[in-house]
Image: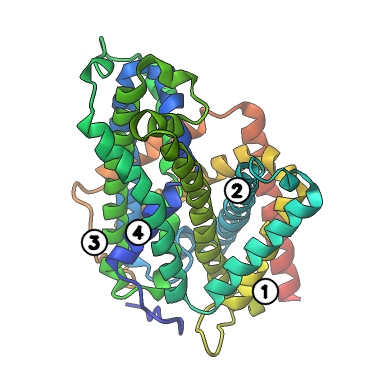
Amino acid sequence: MIDQDEGLKRELGIADVAINVINIAIASGIFLLPALIAGILGNASIVAYAVCGFMFLLVALCYAEVSSRITTSGGMYAYIEKAFGPFWGFLANTLFWFGTGAFVAAALINGIADMLSIPFPVLNQSFYRGLLFLVIFVAAAYSNIIGTKQGMMVIKFITLIKILPLILILVAGLVQLNTANLTWQGFPSVDKLGTASLILFFAFAGGETALNVSGEMKNPNRTAPLGLILGVIILVVFYALIQIVSQSALGAELVNQKAPLAAVAGVLLGSWGIKILIGCGVLAIFGSFYSTILGFPRVLFAGAKDGLLPKFLSTVHPKYATPHPAIITFSAIAFIMAVSGGFRQLIVLATITLLITYAGVVLALIRFRLKEDKAYPAGFRLPGGLLIPVVTLIILGWFIFQSKLNELIAVGIFLAVLSIIYAVKIFFSKK
């Protein structure tokens, strides 16, 4: 097997990866999903969680095997680059950190400002909003620069604080379960189930970026796949229970709630529960934002090490053994996007590119299986031959083509521009 040591400290275990998966995925979505899904499927909402949970678990399983083969930093970029070469690696790298990562970070930090602007209206002013962005970006970047282990400690703390109120709601809701609000007649239509599952798919999406720090995992061939699968299973169960408790507490009124979990907390815990849930929502979004600053700079780092990006991005801090130029660069770009305000129009582009990169990872797994490259043996191997990756690829293809034609054209143009940039880079490197 090829030596995949990068000079980074391997300190993260299975629990660290699982916690990071959960932290990344549980953001603003969990506080809005119950009402959205109930509005589509009514009391049959739980079916969408089962279907979508199964779909995303298939994606996670494909990631699990590929991550056991490629144990360097970079996540899906590293998987695609090792399978198909530098050109496809360059496309995947840029799509991932720029088309998805930077825009997601910008969106999340604006979400934090939007929620905080309720008690602090001054944050509606661009100057103070930008100042808040700067403080948060600098604090998150610095915390990640001084050490991955320290960064994981922050993530564990945030995950614990934001999960506890949700667990409290689950306990209170299950004790006071109203089964009359959970009964449903007949199976939902395929169209409605597809619409609801598409929304839920993006709620689960993102947890796989916890694998971006594979270069800093202990025994990554085992840690990466087991941590990812454990995290996804916990998410599926957790989301489903949240939906059940929400429907039980609010019944038909659930679909009319703009902040459904806050309303559920009000019914189950009283007015103090509403305040806790609002604070929990802010913390949840910050936790996901913080994880983007931890994970996505490793994609730049990996691309620079492979010669696809400027070499300085592959520098490792002599004391903290973290990719500090990559962390600073990613944070600066995401900060500019956040203050510009134009990023909201490109959120759809970010979600489509994420699905495309998922498909790229599944194709990489298929190629590794067919090629049986001895340089990248599987530490974790899926049963059933190519059945799981092929089924997963079909599902992802269906999701991608649910997008509008103009959105797919925009992605095509973006890929064409990246291809030209790569061709120019190769031309001048030969010169």
- The kind of residue tagged 3 is Phe
Find numbered disc 4 in the image and state the secondary structure of the residue it sits on. helix
Q: Which tag, 2 or 1, sits closer to the chain's start?
A: 2
Find numbered disc 2 in the image and state the secondary structure of the residue it sits on. helix
Give coordinates of residue 16: x percent, y percent.
34, 65
- The residue under label 4 is 19
- The residue under label 1 is 310
Q: Which tag, 2 or 3, sits closer to the chain's start?
A: 2
Question: Which residue is at the front of the view, 110 or 164?
Answer: 164
Q: Which tag, 3 or 1, sits closer to the chain's start?
A: 1
**In-image side of 218 versus 400 (left or right):** left
Residue depicted at 69% across the width and 57% down the height: 132
Label 1: how many Cα within 10 Å (few below 14, some 14–19, many 20+): few
- The kind of residue tagged 2 is Ile
Q: Select label 2 or label 1 by which is in front.
A: 2
Label 2: how many Cα within 10 Å (few below 14, some 14–19, many 20+): many
The Cα atoms of the two marked residues, 4 and 2, are separated by: 21 Å
Residue depicted at 43% across the width and 39% down the height: 272
Marks 2 and 1 in Cβ contact (< 8 Å)? no
Question: Which residue is at the front of the view, 112 or 204?
Answer: 112
Give coordinates of residue 275: x percent, y percent.
48, 41
The image quadrant of residue 98 is: bottom right
Give coordinates of residue 6: x percent, y percent.
46, 81
- The residue under label 2 is 112
Find numbered disc 1 in the image and state the secondary structure of the residue it sits on. loop
The Cα atoms of the two marked residues, 4 and 1, are separated by: 32 Å
- The residue under label 3 is 380
